Amino acid sequence: MWGTMISLRHINKLYHTGKSTLVALDDINLTIRKNEIFGILGKSGAGKSTLLRIVNLLERPTSGEVIVDNISLTTLSSRALRMHRQKIGMIFQHFNLLESRSLFDNVALPLEIQSCSKDVIDKKVSTLLELVGLADKHHHFPSELSGGQKQRVGIARALASHPAVLLCDEATSALDTESTQSILNLLKKINRELGLTILLITHELEVVKQVCDRVGVLHHGRLIEEDATVNIFARPKQLATQQLVQQALHFYSPNATDEGLTLKLTFIGDESEIPLISILVKQFDVTMNIRQALIEKIQDTTVGFTICQLTGAPLAIQQALQFIQSTAIQVEVLHGAI
Ligand SMILES: Nc1ncnc2c1ncn2[C@@H]1O[C@H](COP(=O)(O)OP(=O)(O)OP(=O)(O)O)[C@@H](O)[C@H]1O
Ligand SMILES: [Mg+2]
């Protein structure tokens, strides 16, 4: 059973600068389940960081309610809020480590603030550094680490106060592909092993594809779409989502001079086993030119995208298209008319 971990209700955030007012978040309603990895995707300026900072009330919403682990944070006194914030860890794009402190002391900081005893701190910090794969680096300083290693310290520090939720603000955006991969794997591991709920924001679909169970798309301060990750890729409903997917997967865009019909076929899961193209060519008098074929593994589902050009006599093209539409394969006409 999935319970609810985070609930945002009618969240609005306005920024007043001089005479103008900017609507950074417009009536956001969102429920994040316990133990899921939820991704918020959006372009620069969409309001992602603002939304994330509202979850732990680093930023106050102009109106609306934030509920985390059944506590309505927006109604708490500042003292009670400080207590409850310990349930929410956060990691950042630029790590935010203290350069003058060793790794050990960076991770120990939240425990020192909670006045834990030296023994407790020693034990806990060692366990955390082990968990993130830095057991041999206790006495190193941040300047001696790679970006990926610094983010591991950031994660260990965020976990020190036993949070139930981890907020990640573009946690891999400053990293190369390999370090990104290792940090994403670490996030999946702590999600599974510690049962942590993770809310991450990113402008990269690749990140979402690798780790998220579900995704919300933020566009100009509005949550325009919310779905299982595979659906965001395979059946994006909103134009802005379609564009994000198009950019990330580098789909072929048709030329005005392309003949016949240019189609985008999306095969989800087992449908990829239907030998569609050979059926079409055999049964209808058409030619099929494959422009692009991509196979993506998203969570446990395989999604295939084929962009192809269908040429032949208008009637044959029409019948072939009708045949495709009668299957479970999704088809979209990118260019051309019959
Ligand atoms: N303190 C502030 N005062 C005024 N405007 C702000 C403030 N913080 C953010 N904004 C504005 O709110 C909008 C959303 O900003 P936000 O930082 O949440 O975007 P983002 O999606 O995180 O972008 P990025 O991907 O570039 O980090 C932007 O137009 C930004 O300029
Ligand atoms: Mg941001």
Image (tube, helix red, strand yellow):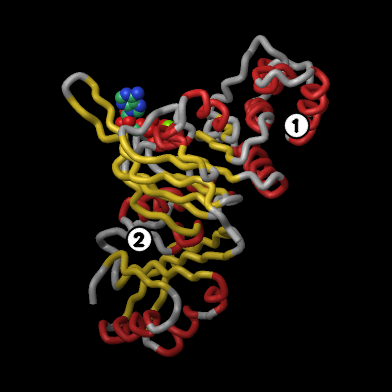
Q: Residue at x 45, y 49 (%)?
A: 248
Secondary-structure class at tag 2: loop
Q: Is residue 69 above or below residue 316?
A: above
Q: Nearer the viewer, residue 155 or 29?
A: 29
The percent position of residue 199, horizontal first and vertical second, equals 52, 42
The amino acid at mark 1 is Leu
106 relative to 13 in the view: left or right: right
Earlier in the chain: of badge 1 and badge 2, it is: 1
Disc number for residue 128: 1
Mark in the foreground, 1 or 2: 1
Instruction: State the quadrant of the C terminus.
Output: bottom left
Query: Where ligand 1 lies, by image quadrant?
Result: top left
Residue 238 visible somewhere in the drawing? yes
For label 1, the crowd category at 10 Å Cα-Cα, with few meaning under 14, some 14 to 19 and many 20 or more, is many
267 relative to 101 in the view: left or right: left
Secondary-structure class at tag 1: helix
Q: Which residue is disc 2 drawn over?
A: 237
Q: Residue at x 78, y 28 (%)?
A: 124
Of all residues shown, which one is farthest toward the top?
100
315 relative to 197 in the view: left or right: left
C-alpha span from label 1 to label 2:
41 Å
Q: Residue at x 42, y 65 (%)?
A: 307
Instruction: State the quadrant of the N terminus.
Output: bottom right
Q: Is residue 298 above or below residue 116?
A: below
The percent position of residue 173, horizontal first and vertical second, equals 52, 34
Q: Is residue 156 above or below residue 261?
A: above
